[in-house]
Image (cartoon, helix red, strand yellow):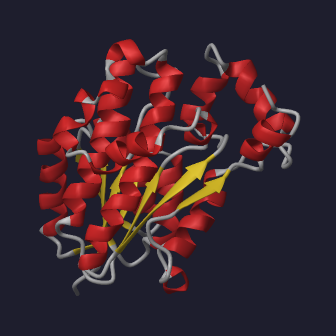
């Protein structure tokens, strides 16, 4: 029996929650740079009745991305993509954040967009963080959206001297993710497929716990305490949004970013989180 193929990057809690929500009956190829973590998550899913296969891949490397796509194509056309891979401001230096979160995501959206099946859908995980940075000029947004991926890191705004710190690098990477989704959804549409982004706020995952224990830990704890929801979110709540976007109920949604942050961004601009 042929199965629809789902490509999932990032063997983390959000990726797994989405894959568990929409991946039953599909062939799931799960990619992550950490081989052991990838195998562990794939086994958890397999033991729960899913058909998940681990694949060691590096989101910062085009050849690695293409190798994972080729592996997925061994099972049929790729119908779904979930990109949850990335590094946070407390986990990596500026150069790695830009290479993985910004460049790598751009390459993934481009390469999957070349082969995505008709009726297919992709979701990439962005972040509320990109919504808090200072607004960019329209031309800067356009450059993030349409500059060829191999030239992105040469943009003036992305040069090391113009990036203040790892948080700034992360914010602009996530801004770029959302602009790339808008540009790439045009190409995906030519194949009869859709592409969207989800921008989560504070979601309790190992990555978030690293942030809680990092140099900005108090900032993040204050953020979810003073947002309208008064708490952090869960990976399953992000999966609720992904399930809509990847279903027929979301058939008219493409090129969009959905902010799911308990109102933290609203509070940052208009409430008690205002700086």
Q: Is residue 29 visible?
A: yes
- Which of the image's four quarters has the N terminus? bottom left
Please name whichever residue, 235 or 174, is drawn nearer the observer in this view of the structure. 174
Please name whichever residue, 59 or 169, is drawn nearer the observer in this view of the structure. 169
Measured along the vertical axis of the image, is residue 24 above or below residue 208? below
Rendering coords of residue 15 (x, y %): 46, 53
Rendering coords of residue 157 (x, y %): 37, 27
Measured along the vertical axis of the image, is residue 72 above or below residue 67? below
Residue found at x 59% / y 33%: 133
Which corner quadrant of the image does residue 216 belong to? top right
Q: Is residue 149 left or right of residue 158?
A: left
- Which of the image's four quarters has the C terminus? top right
Which corner quadrant of the image does residue 213 belong to? top right
Please name whichever residue, 72 or 98, is drawn nearer the observer in this view of the structure. 98
Q: Is residue 221 left or right of residue 23?
A: right
Residue found at x 43% / y 19%: 163
Residue found at x 42% / y 51%: 179
């Amino acid at each position: 029996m042929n199965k629809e193929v789902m490509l999932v990057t990032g063997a983390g809690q959000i990726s797994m929650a989405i894959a568990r929500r929409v991946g039953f009956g599909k062939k799931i190829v799960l990619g992550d740079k950490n081989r052991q973590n990838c195998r562990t998550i794939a086994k958890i899913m397999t033991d729960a009745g899913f058909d998940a296969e681990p694949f060691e891949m590096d989101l910062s490397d085009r050849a690695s991305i293409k190798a994972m796509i080729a592996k997925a194509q061994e099972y049929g056309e790729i119908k779904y993509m979930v990109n949850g891979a990335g590094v946070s401001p407390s986990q990596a230096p500026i150069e790695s954040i830009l290479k993985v979160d910004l460049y790598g995501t751009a390459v993934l959206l481009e390469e999957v967009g070349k082969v995505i099946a008709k009726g297919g859908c992709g979701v990439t995980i962005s972040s509320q963080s990109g919504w808090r940075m200072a607004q960019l000029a329209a031309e800067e947004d356009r450059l993030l959206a349409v500059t060829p991926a191999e030239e992105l890191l040469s943009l003036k705004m992305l040069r090391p001297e113009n990036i203040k710190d790892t948080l700034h690098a992360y914010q602009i990477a996530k801004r770029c993710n959302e602009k790339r989704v808008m540009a790439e959804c045009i190409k995906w549409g030519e194949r009869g497929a859709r592409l969207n982004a989800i921008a989560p706020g504070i979601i309790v995952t190992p990555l978030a716990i690293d942030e809680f224990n990092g140099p900005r830990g108090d900032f993040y704890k204050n953020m979810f305490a003073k947002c309208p929801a008064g708490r952090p979110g869960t990976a399953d709540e992000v999966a609720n949004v992904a399930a809509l976007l990847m279903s027929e109920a979301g058939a008219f949604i493409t090129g969009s970013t959905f902010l799911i942050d308990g109102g933290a961004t609203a509070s940052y601009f208009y409430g008690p989180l205002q700086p």
